[in-house]
Amino acid sequence: MNRRTFLTAVAAAASLPAATLPSTIIDTHVHFYDPSRSQGVPWPPKSDTLLYRTVLPDEFVRVTKPLGVTGVIKVEASAWLEDNQWVLDLAAKNPIIVASVGRLEPGTPDFRKNLARFHKNRLFRGIRLGKLQDGEAFLSDLKEMAGAGLELDAIGPPALLAQLVRLTDRVPSLRVVINHLPFDAPKEEGARKEYQASLVELGKRPQVYAKVSEVLRRVGNRVPEDAAFYKPSLDELWNVFGTDRMIYGSNWPVSEKVAPYATVFKVVREYFASKGQEASENYFWKNSKAAYRW
C-alpha cells in the first residue's frame, strides 16, 4: 500500500460524522510476528511478499491511530507453543494489546498444564482452533477451559457452523467467537441449507459471538468500498446475532491483501452507524468485552 492510497483511505474514513464514532474501538483480530527472530516464524511463508515482514504494534498504531482505534486483541497464527509466551511478553511492553488469543491443542497430554501456565497472565483470554473434534479428552479440555472463564476462537470454512452446533450442544458453557464472518454460503443446495440452519441455530445461543472480520470482497479487478454493497451479508448476520453479539475485527495485516485498513474500517463503521450509536458502541468494543472478558 503506497502513501497516497493510505491517506485517501484515512480521509474517507474520517469523513463520516464524528457523532457516529464509538468512544472506544477494540480490534479483536490482529496478527503480530517477526521473521527476523533467530527461530523465524512458521507463518506467513517467505513466498508471501506482502505479509512476510516484521509486523509489530508500533506499525499498527501508526496505521490505526488516525481512525481512533484504542486497543487490539492479538490472535495467534503460530502453532509453536512458546509463541504464546512471545506474545504475552510483547503485550507487556505494548499496552495497545488488551488481550491475547493463543494456540494450544485440547485433547493432548500437556494441554491443561500449558493452559494453566499461560492463563496465569490475565491477558491470555482463550485459544484459537481450526479443527474441532468429538473425542472425550478434547471435550473435557474445553470444559476445563470454559470453567476457567476462557473462550474459543473458531476458524474454518462454512461447514464449521454445523460443527459448532454440535460442540456447543456438548459444552454449552463455552463462549465461542466465530472468526471471519460473513461467510460466502455454499453453492450446493444441501450444504447451503445446512449452513443456513446452523447459522440460525447458533444465533439462538447467547454464548456464541460473530466476529465480523472479513467483509470486503474483490469483484473482478476492484474492491467495492460502499457499505451498501455489503449490506445483504451484514444484514444476514445482524438478523441472526443482533446488536449484542457482533464483534469488530480487521484481520490485519492479512486484510491488506484486499484493501487498506482504513477502507475495511470505513465500511463497517458506516454500516453500524446506520444502526445507531448503541449498536456502534456494542460492535466496536462492548460485545468484545463480554466475549473475551478483557
Image (cartoon, rainbow, N blue to C red):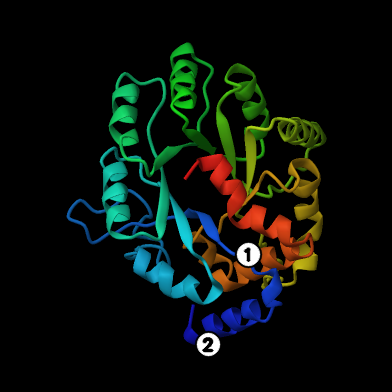
SS at mark 2 in the image = helix
Left or right of 224, for residue 256: left
Residue 114 screen position, x and y as percent: 30, 29
Residue topped by disc 1: 22
Residue 286 screen position, x and y as percent: 60, 50
SS at mark 1 in the image = loop
Left or right of 255, for residue 206: right
Q: Residue furthest bottom?
A: 4
- Name which quarter of the figure residue 10 lies in: bottom right
Mark 2 to mark 1: distance in Å?
26 Å
Residue topped by disc 2: 4
Residue 3 screen position, x and y as percent: 48, 85
Pick the residue in front: 202 or 52.
202
Q: Residue furthest top?
A: 136
Left or right of 272, for residue 51: left
Residue drawn at x 54%, y 84% is 7
Q: Is residue 43 above or below residue 106?
A: below
Q: In the image, what residue type sits under mark 1? A: Pro
Q: Is residue 75 above or below residue 154?
A: below
Residue 165 visible in the shown view: yes
Pick the residue in front: 138 or 123.
123
Residue drawn at x 53%, y 27% is 132
Left or right of 172, for residue 86: left
